[in-house]
Each structure stands twice: as structure tokens, then as C-alpha cells.
């Protein structure tokens, strides 16, 4: 028997699984509340940059990096705010569809955040340290983002409980053999 929280979203029914869908939506909105302030701060910073004295010193590549960071952070904010609007304005009985779109937009919003962060990093590092240093900073950061935000979630699997028995018991608190394991 499958518990509702272990069911795939496509297996849930708008009416029969109303409580489970509501719980999942609440969790998703909490996740958005965690990520949204950081994106908003980045966007606010990017919106003020053109008014700084040294912005005029940016060359074409610096302005392109700025444009990518500005656009992707703006789109990220839109994607991360949309689940809240879907929750408030979407059809109440279309629970599965609202949740599916909210998850998609949250993932897209976080991907756009990664693009904004990396473009801003490259542009600033290039302006301050030069092109070579900018690549040396941005490439490892890109690998780290992909490792944490893509590879790790795709490789984390549910652990099945171990069957009970003396061979599977944990060692005692002193670091010795499990109790009752003999010698």
C-alpha cells in the first residue's frame, strides 16, 4: 500500500487527495519563501548598478553579463512568485495542475537564479580581477551549482529500512560490536 506522500503527483486526485495536495502546496510555498528574498536582493542590487559611477567603464562583454544577470534574476523573481498567485487566483479544484505548474516554475526560477548568480559573478570578477581570474572563479562555481542543485537531488534515493536482526544492529555507544553479537 502506498502512502499519499509517496505517490507521484500524477497519481493524486484533485478531490480524493485534497489534504495531501494542500500539504504539498504548503511545503512548496515555504521553499519559495526561503529562496525568494535572496533573488530579490540580487535583483535590487542589479537595478542600482547602472547608477554607479564606474558602470560606464564596462565594456561590451561586461554589459552583456550584466544584462544576462539582470534579465535572469527578473525572470527568476517572476517564476518564484507565480506559485503564490496560482494558489490565490487559480481554480480551487485544479489542485494537481496548480501544484504541477508551481513545481515547474520553482525549478525554472532556481535555474534562472543560478544563471543570474553566475553571470553576475563572471561580470564582477572580470571587471575587478580580469578575464582569466573571472573564468577561474566562475567555472568551479558553475560545477558546484550543478553538483548541488542538479546532481545531488538526482542521486539522493530513499533508504529502505533494514530488516531487524542482530547482524543489522548498530554498534553500542562505546563503538564496540552490536549487543548480543557474541565475542
Image (tube, helix red, strand yellow):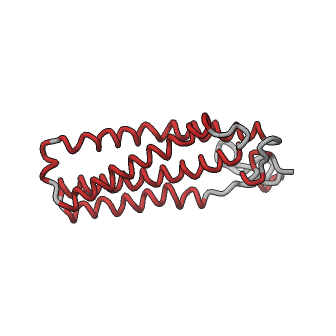
Q: Quadrant of residue 41?
A: top left
Observer-nearest residue: 39 or 88? 88
Question: In the orientation shown, which residue stands out farthest toward the right?
Answer: 1
Observer-nearest residue: 48 or 171? 48
Q: Count of labels shown?
A: 0
**Is residue 183 among what the camera can see?**
no
Percent from the top left, x then y, of residue 73?
Answer: 38, 48
Check the picture and name the quadrant holding the C terminus: bottom right
Residue shown at the point (78%, 53%) measured from the top left:
11
The answer to whether 45 appears left or right of 109 in the picture is: left
Residue shown at the point (13%, 47%) measured from the top left:
54
Residue shown at the point (35%, 42%) measured from the top left:
43
Q: Is residue 75 depicted above or below 138 in this figure?
A: above
Question: In the orientation shown, which residue stands out farthest toward the top?
Answer: 88
Percent from the top left, x then y, of residue 119?
Answer: 32, 56
Percent from the top left, x then y, of residue 33?
Answer: 51, 36
Q: Is residue 162 depicted above or below 80 in this figure?
A: below
Observer-nearest residue: 81 or 153? 81
**Is residue 180 among what the camera can see?**
yes
The answer to whether 23 appears left or right of 139 in the picture is: right
Observer-nearest residue: 66 or 7? 66
Residue shown at the point (47%, 54%) measured from the top left:
111
Amino acid at each position: 500500500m502506498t502512502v499519499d506522500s509517496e505517490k507521484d503527483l500524477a497519481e493524486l486526485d484533485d478531490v480524493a487527495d485534497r489534504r495531501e495536495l494542500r500539504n504539498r502546496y504548503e511545503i512548496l510555498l515555504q521553499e519559495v519563501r526561503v529562496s525568494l528574498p535572496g533573488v530579490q536582493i540580487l535583483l535590487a542590487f542589479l537595478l542600482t548598478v547602472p547608477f554607479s559611477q564606474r558602470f560606464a567603464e564596462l565594456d561590451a562583454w561586461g554589459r552583456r553579463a550584466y544584462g544576462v544577470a539582470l534579465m535572469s534574476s527578473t525572470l527568476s523573481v517572476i517564476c518564484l512568485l507565480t506559485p503564490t498567485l496560482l494558489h490565490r487566483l487559480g481554480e480551487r479544484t485544479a489542485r494537481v495542475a496548480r501544484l504541477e505548474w508551481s513545481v515547474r516554475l520553482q525549478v525554472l526560477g532556481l535555474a534562472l537564479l543560478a544563471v543570474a548568480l553566475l553571470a553576475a559573478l563572471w561580470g564582477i570578477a572580470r571587471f575587478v580581477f580580469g578575464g582569466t581570474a573571472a573564468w577561474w572563479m566562475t567555472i568551479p562555481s558553475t560545477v558546484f551549482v550543478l553538483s548541488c542543485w542538479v546532481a545531488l537531488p538526482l542521486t539522493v534515493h530513499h533508504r529502505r529500512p533494514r530488516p531487524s536482526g542482530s547482524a543489522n544492529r548498530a554498534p553500542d555507544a562505546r563503538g564496540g560490536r552490536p549487543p548480543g553479537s557474541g565475542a
